Amino acid sequence: MSRPDPIALLCQLRREAEGPDAEPRLGQLLASSPEARLVQLALGEFERESEVRAGDEVRLSILSEQAILEAAEPPPRDSHVTLPPALSLFRRSAKARRLRLALAVAAAIVVMGGVAYGLRATGRLLGLGLGPATPATPSATARTPALPRRAASPRATTAPREPPLAPPPSLPAASGAPREAAPVARPRATPLAAPEPLGEPRRSRAAALFSDANAARRAGREQDAAALYRQLLLAYPSAREAPPSRLALAKLLRAKNPGAALTQFEALAQGATPFRAEALWGIASSAQALGQRAKEEQALLDLVQEFPTSPYASAARARLGDDRR
Amino acid sequence: MLRALPLPLTANGPSVPHGVDELWPLAEAGGKGDATALRTLLSRVSPTLLRVVRRVMGGQHPEVEDVTQECAIEFVRALRQFRRESSVQHFASRVALRVAMNARRRRRAAKRAPEFPTDFVDADEADGGHLQPDAHLASRTAVAVIRNLCDELPAAQAEVLALHCVLGHTMSEVSIICGAPLETVRSRLRAARLALVERAMSQPLLREILETPP
């Protein structure tokens, strides 16, 4: 019979470390095998590097939710087009996804610019007054000088500038530009001239805020992170990043301010949220910290009833059992 | 030339007895697109994904979160091809290992310098903890040697070496995870071990450990 591989034996003995004779055998192996000593040394370090850290729970919930969203997109390998290996590798990288997003944004800008130019030309032809030559509200242009300048192009110095237009309803009211005096003569231009800066769509700003907030949280700057999450929730309440932001904010608040955390968890639990189980668990924990037994028990009961197979459910059942004892 | 490890996983190795893994029903439902099952399943396996990525990339590596997310996406997509040939945790572990090793290989192929040294030992770190500074330095060196070797070995050997020396799986587990016969795994490990010893002997600190019994 061949001599067992020292590395394989080491892994086996480390696994059986609780056994009565595992420790002396491990000692013998380490004394006799240099490779085993080397791997033992490395495995200890690998274990230290992969220890659970504060914030892992939130980090993983956010990552999981994003993964479910991304994996829901039709996977490229199921398509009938087979890409060469180099491209399929590129396709899988996170950077490739960001590049695709940037390309999509650039394409959207080009299309919007073309349509806007076409409409303006049509308006001029029909005499609809789309420029300062026939200003419907001259003061409105003066009040909002920053918006049209952002789309600076060689044409901007010679062609008439777009007057300010109202933002889409989903944007927050505090974007700075006055909303009155929308001219009646150019209703079709409204969707083309939203006050968002070109090249920086709403989705990417929410994503950027989310990314900054996560970076602050990872760096231990909890107050900055909480402020950024709040800013995101205020500015983009319907963004894809809003639910994970609320969850992260609630978890940040839980230790020092369970009342505020409870408010956030309750808001998160409303409606069809992917984080309802986490929210209910958070409500129960925060209510417990605040001594609100009835609310805690109700949240645990909801959790067990709505998510019987969730990992939280068994813990909730245990807590309910303890409470009723 | 560095080549990416193949995905998806279609192994034909020793199977795990049916009814052993409580996550199988969730994996099956998740593979059919049940979002609730996927969410619950990911809550169970995502710590494994993160652990594997931290071990392969380095605990402080700036791309750990990106790569973990990539692992989660690949895991969800690969569930459609999951044939209960291993436990779900082992399956997740292998997906994460391949994605993380591919990420490292991509970095090397692109000849990108790391944003900051991830395998360094600074004075504070060496001073703290329960290890002596020299032992800590030696263990960090051993880790760096194994990671670099996994980047350079042929894919099959690198996978077996990583499953053993990075994740600490036993031989039978590696056989199940890789879907390869035990003898094949043993032979791959033997080849990888020779390369490991040769590489370690070139590091003075590690040579001392290799040549001096405790």
Image (tube, coloured by chain):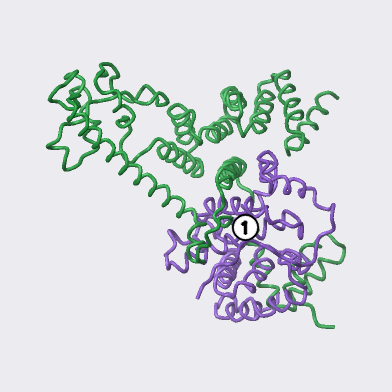
Chain colours: A green, B purple
Q: List the single residue furthest toward the top.
A: A180
Can residue B76 be seen at all in this image of the molecule?
Answer: yes
Task: Assess disc 1: are there few (<14), some (14-19) or many (≥20) residues with their C-alpha within 10 Å of its C-alpha.
Answer: many
- Write the residue at 71% across / 56% down: B82
Chain under disc 1: B
**A210 up-or-down from B199: above or below:** above
Q: List the single residue furthest toward the bottom.
A: A1
Image x and y of residue B114, in percent: 44, 62
Q: In which quarter of the image is residue B54?
A: bottom right
Front residue of A200/A191: it is: A191
Relative placement, left or right, of A253 versus A146 is right
Can residue B121 be seen at all in this image of the molecule?
Answer: no
Q: Name the residue under label 1.
A: B96
Say which quadrant the C terminus of chain A sits in.
top right
- Write the residue at 49% across / 53% down: A94
Front residue of B92/A135: it is: A135
Front residue of A228/A27: it is: A228
Relative placement, left or right, of A321 versus B190 is right
- Write the residue at 56% across / 49% down: A74
Image x and y of residue A208, in percent: 42, 40
Q: In which quarter of the image is residue A154?
A: top left
Judging from the image, what secondary structure is the residue with disc 1 in? helix
Front residue of B12/B51: it is: B12
Relative placement, left or right, of A163 versus A308 is left
Image x and y of residue B64, in percent: 54, 54
Image x and y of residue A272, in percent: 61, 28
Say which quadrant the N terminus of chain A sits in.
bottom right
Q: In which quarter of the image is residue A195?
A: top left
**A239 up-or-down from A183: above or below:** below
- Write the residue at 59% across / 40% down: A58
Q: Look at label 1 and name its amino acid.
A: Ala
